[in-house]
Amino acid sequence: MPAALAHLLFVATLWLGLGWATHGHAQSSPLPAWTITVRDGVFAPKRVEVPAGQRIKFILKNEGPGPLEFENADLHVEKIVAAGAESFVVFKLPPGEHMFVDEFNIATGELLVIAK
């Protein structure tokens, strides 16, 4: 067998093997996600229920003219999102009610997250 063909078969086998391994791992534990939109310092939705003690993902869409600082100081969660941008945070919450705020719009930017 020519060396180039042997190398190609080795690379293909390695690529497929790694692809199956990572695909299987990613599919075994889906991460629940919620999209949170912020427009002019106001969260939509304003209240979200999530599972307690489980990793969750919030996708943050900032549709306002200024930056967003998504924060809960007690839980050490903080993310700054530029105007017109999108980002995400992943975290676990203990059971209870947790208030997240937009530090740049403290009067209007509140999101109540209830972990059950």
Image (cartoon, helix red, strand yellow):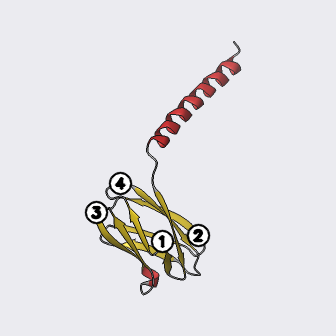
Residue type highlighted by circle 4: Gln
In primary-sequence order, the first of circles 2 and 1 is 1
User: Vertical placement of 74 versus 106: above or below?
Assistant: above
Helix, strand or loop for disc 3: loop
Mark 4 crowd level (few <14, some 14–19, many ≥20, 10 Å Cα):
some
Image position, residue 68 (x, y; %): 50, 76
As measured in the structure, the alpha-carbon distance from the residue carrying label 2 to the one carrying label 3 is: 30 Å
Q: CA distance from mark 1 to mark 3?
A: 25 Å
Does dot 4 land on a helix, a strand or a loop? loop
Label 2 belongs to which residue? 85
Q: Which residue is mark 1?
A: 80
Q: Quadrant of residue 3?
A: top right
Instruction: Decide: few, some or many residues near mark 3? Use Cα within 10 Å; few <14, some 14-19, many ≥20.
Output: few
Alpha carbon distance from label 4 to label 2: 26 Å
Give the camera-side residue of 15 and 105: 105
Kindly report which numbered mark, 4 or 2, lies closer to the viewer in this rendering. Answer: 4
**Along the line of sight, which residue is nearer the eye, 80 or 23?**
23
Displayed quadrant of residue 110: bottom left
Which residue is label 4 attached to?
Answer: 54
Q: Nearer the viewer, mark 1 or mark 3?
A: 3
Numbered mark located on residue 95 in the image:
3
Given contact means CB atoms under 8 Å apart, are the residues at marks 1 and 3 in contact? no
Counting from the top left corner in percent of width and height, residue 30 is at 46, 48
The spot of residue 71 in percent (x, y) is: 40, 73
Mark 2 or mark 3, whichever is nearer to me: 3
Q: Residues within 10 Å of mark 2 (few under 14, many from 20)?
A: some
Q: Position of residue 10 (x, y in %)?
A: 61, 23
Dot placed on the residue nearer the N-terminal end, 1 or 3: 1
Q: Is residue 58 above or below residue 46?
A: above
